[in-house]
């Protein structure tokens, strides 16, 4: 059964965010990232996944811990508590989800589902091909780990913001993308991930 993720609130629409203090003095670094977010959303809308992934990685360079509900960390200077910090975290959470989705799309283009092992080609050759296969297998595994971490990071930001629906979204994404393995009763790979999600859901008020 496929589940549906909650859409991000229209009150945090990108065009509205561009007009708020998020883009002013305390977030001048974001003047470059603004173009990255536009590119992320445009590329995702047109399913240009390579561009989407590259733009996401650029935007997520700013997910370095400086933006919290309590302001900047002491070593990075002070920042007053204001609505723009929350808007930054909401945007970063959305980009985490988009980046993870785009990474899953890359896996699927390789004929692999999230957290599934790489498929050994039938026409592999000698020792050189064996070396290439090892590199390819590790790359596929790293993509799955990266996508899973992206969904979990979105959930973490949702917990920090007190937005339970964002944690729900992470659970929905991971459930839907993990269905092929779950249907095949390959549960062991997913236990740590779903345990983390269950713990996060409980901390945000879910008791189911």
Image (cartoon, grey):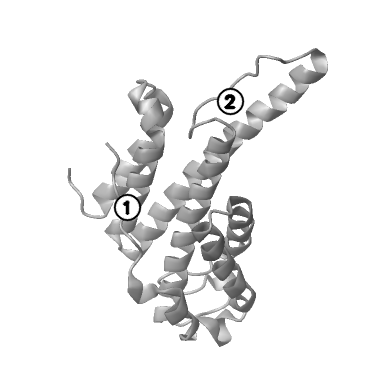
Instruction: Tell me residue 107's x, y (percent).
Output: 56, 37
Q: Nearer the viewer, residue 59 or 71?
A: 59
Q: Is residue 81 visible?
A: no
Instruction: Name the disc covering residue 184, or none.
Output: none
* Residue 155 relative to residue 118: left or right: left
Q: Say which residue appears at 65% left-offset and 14% top-offset.
A: 122
Q: Is residue 130 visible?
A: yes
Where 69 sits versus 122, above or below? below
Q: How many numbered circles does the render carry?
A: 2
Q: Nearer the viewer, residue 103 or 170?
A: 103
* Residue 63 relative to residue 178: left or right: right
Where 114 sits versus 31, above or below? above
Q: Quadrant of residue 86?
A: bottom left
* Residue 115 relative to residue 11: left or right: right
Q: Secondary structure at mark 1?
A: loop
| Image quarter (top left, top right, bottom left or bottom right) of the N terminus | top left
| Image quarter (top left, top right, bottom left or bottom right) of the C terminus | top left
Task: Name, please, the residue furthest toward the front.
Answer: 46
Task: Name, please, the residue furthest toward the left.
Answer: 208
Q: Nearer the viewer, residue 122 or 143?
A: 122
Instruction: Tell me residue 147's x, y (percent).
Output: 51, 44
Q: Secondary structure at mark 2?
A: loop
Q: Which residue is mark 2?
A: 118
Q: Which residue is mark 1?
A: 5
Q: Say which residue appears at 82% left-offset and 19% top-offset.
A: 128
Q: Nearer the viewer, residue 46 or 144?
A: 46
User: Counting other residues with Cα less than 10 Å from the Cα at mark 2, is it few (<14), some (14-19), or many (20 or more)?
Assistant: some
Cα gap from disc 2 to disc 1, whole angstroms: 28 Å
Q: Say which residue appears at 17% left-offset and 46% top-offset.
A: 207
């Amino acid at each position: 059964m496929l589940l549906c993720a909650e859409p991000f609130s229209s009150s945090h629409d990108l065009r509205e965010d561009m007009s708020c203090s998020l883009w002013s003095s305390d977030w001048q670094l974001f003047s470059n990232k603004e173009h990255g977010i536009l590119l992320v959303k445009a590329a995702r809308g047109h399913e240009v996944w390579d561009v989407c992934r590259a733009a996401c990685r650029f935007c997520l360079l700013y997910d370095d811990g400086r933006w919290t509900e309590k302001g900047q960390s002491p070593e990075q200077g002070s920042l007053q508590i204001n609505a723009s910090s929350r808007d930054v975290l909401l945007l970063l959470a959305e980009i985490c989800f988009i980046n993870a989705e785009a990474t899953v799309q890359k896996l699927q283009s390789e004929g692999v589902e999230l957290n599934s092992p790489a498929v050994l080609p039938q026409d592999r050759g000698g020792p050189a091909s064996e070396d290439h296969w090892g590199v390819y297998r590790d790359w596929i595994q790293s993509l799955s780990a990266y996508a899973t971490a992206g969904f979990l990071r979105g959930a973490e930001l949702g917990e920090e913001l007190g937005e339970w629906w964002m944690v729900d979204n992470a659970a929905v994404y991971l459930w839907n993308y993990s269905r092929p393995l779950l249907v095949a009763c390959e549960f062991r790979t997913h236990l740590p991930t779903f345990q983390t999600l269950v713990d996060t859901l409980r901390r945000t008020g879910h008791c189911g």
